[in-house]
Image: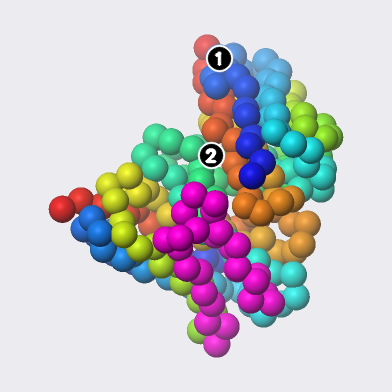
Amino acid sequence: EIVLTQSPGTLSLSPGDRATLSCRASQSVRSRYIAWYQQKPGQSPRLLIYAASSRATGIPDRFSGSGSGTDFTLNISRLEPEDFAVYYCQQYDNSPWTFGQGTKVEIK
Amino acid sequence: QVTLKESGPALVKPTQTLKLTCTLSGFSLSTSGMRVSWIRQPPGKALEWLARIDWDDDEFYSTSLQTRLTISKDTSKNQVVLTMTNMDPVDTATYYCVRFPGLAAAGDYWGQGTQVTVSS
């Protein structure tokens, strides 16, 4: 089973800052099979990035994903007030599929 | 319009079996490459992937829960059903069903989730 470790657990930033979130896999994941989701309190998660670097429909271009092998990154270039949320990575390469434990981006 | 809607009991007792139904709209699980997963989230905790069923009837399960889970589909009703046996208070969570519309596709549509509490 592939274990995904996200860091940091919490990121305290201000609107306009750049956010860099990390997702490290316990074994290599084919890049086509890494996704990032955003979840706000009381809401279902929303797909942001699929195939490691492709933005889902309607996602602003301030969100970008990168990485390969075991190291993947989600960048938010300039934080907007609505971007403060919890972010999860997921691998859907090998079953069982797995999620990271999440990174909370909070207002500093 | 693609939607997924979860339904099932809000409260179950320990040792009981939970049955959750996901009703699909706007797409068919019989479409080649289509997959539906169940994912849960205990209060204040992370997402946990539970199970998946594919258009071709393949089934996949969480390693830690596979002995307790069964996923099935009724294409004629456009529904996916998850059963979980021997429920325990640690299974208290919001349960989501999610569409994965292709072999390399991520979860693009999520249901609103259904809250399940396990308590005597």
Q: Quadrant of residue A89?
A: top right
Quarter the N terminus of chain B occupies? bottom right
Residue A64 magenta-drawn?
A: no
Residue at the spot 55% in from the left edge and 21% down from the top edge: A9
Q: Position of residue B23 (x, y in %)?
A: 48, 72
The numbered mark, 1 or 2, whose residue comes first in the sequence reads 1
Left or right: residue B29 versus residue B86 is right
Letter of the chain that mark 2 sits on in the rendering: A
Q: Quadrant of residue B56?
A: bottom right
Looking at the rendered structure, which numbered label has been put on residue A12?
1
Q: Position of residue B33 (x, y in %)?
A: 74, 70
**B110 is higher (above) or lower (below) than A33:** below
- Residue A65 visible within the image: no
Q: Position of residue A44 (x, y in %)?
A: 50, 48
Magenta range: B51-76
The structure's colour scheme is: rainbow
Residue at the spot 57% in from the left edge and 83% down from the top edge: B75
The mark total stands at: 2
Looking at the rendered structure, which numbered label has been put on residue A39?
2
In 3D space, how far apart are the residues under numbered discs 1 and 2 (Cα atoms)? Answer: 17 Å
Left or right: residue B119 versus residue A83 is left
